[in-house]
Amino acid sequence: MTRLTGRALRVTIFIGDNDLWHHRPLYAEIVHRAHQAGLAGASVFRGVEGFGASSLIHTARLLSMNENLPVAVVIVDEEERVRAFLPQLDELVGGGLVILDDCEVIRYVGRA
């Protein structure tokens, strides 16, 4: 079982839920690759409203079909493991925002 405590690095990838990688949701491809890379964990969060570099506001409040809502993929692991994964993000993320934050893991326990 993987143990992760203390100092860690968090990478957050902000993309749209309509972004694709070879006909598959981009967020799913990122999570799949993070899992293959043996990273400690990855989660996807869908936003209800947001805007990015295009300055176009995407929202679930309008009568549109929830067009391209914001999505955040969050991955946390030891710094060297996250940094080793960054080239894959360079390959996958054509448009969006990728940020790194130092963080401290207080508890990392899997479910039985």
Image (cartoon, helix red, strand yellow):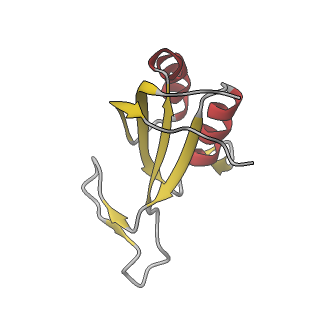
Front position in the image: 53 or 104:
104
Residue 89 in the image: state x and y as whole percent. 51, 29
Q: Is residue 29 found left or right of 73 in the rendered image?
A: right
Q: Which residue is situated farthest in the right direction here?
A: 112
Q: Which residue is situated farthest in the left direction here?
A: 55
Residue 76 in the image: state x and y as whole percent. 49, 34
Q: Please name the residue shown 66% across and 25% down the image.
A: 37
Q: Is residue 5 found left or right of 51 in the rendered image?
A: right
> Quick check: 24 above or below 85?
below
Q: Please name the residue shown 53% across and 19% down the image.
A: 81
Front position in the image: 22 or 71:
71
Q: Please name the residue shown 29% across and 57% down the image.
A: 51
Q: Quick one: quadrant of the N terminus?
A: top right
> Quick check: 57 above or below 100?
below
Q: Which image quadrant for residue 11? A: top left
> Quick check: 57 above or below 91?
below
Q: Is residue 7 found left or right of 109 in the rendered image?
A: left
Q: Please name the residue shown 65% across and 27% down the image.
A: 2
Front position in the image: 49 or 102:
102
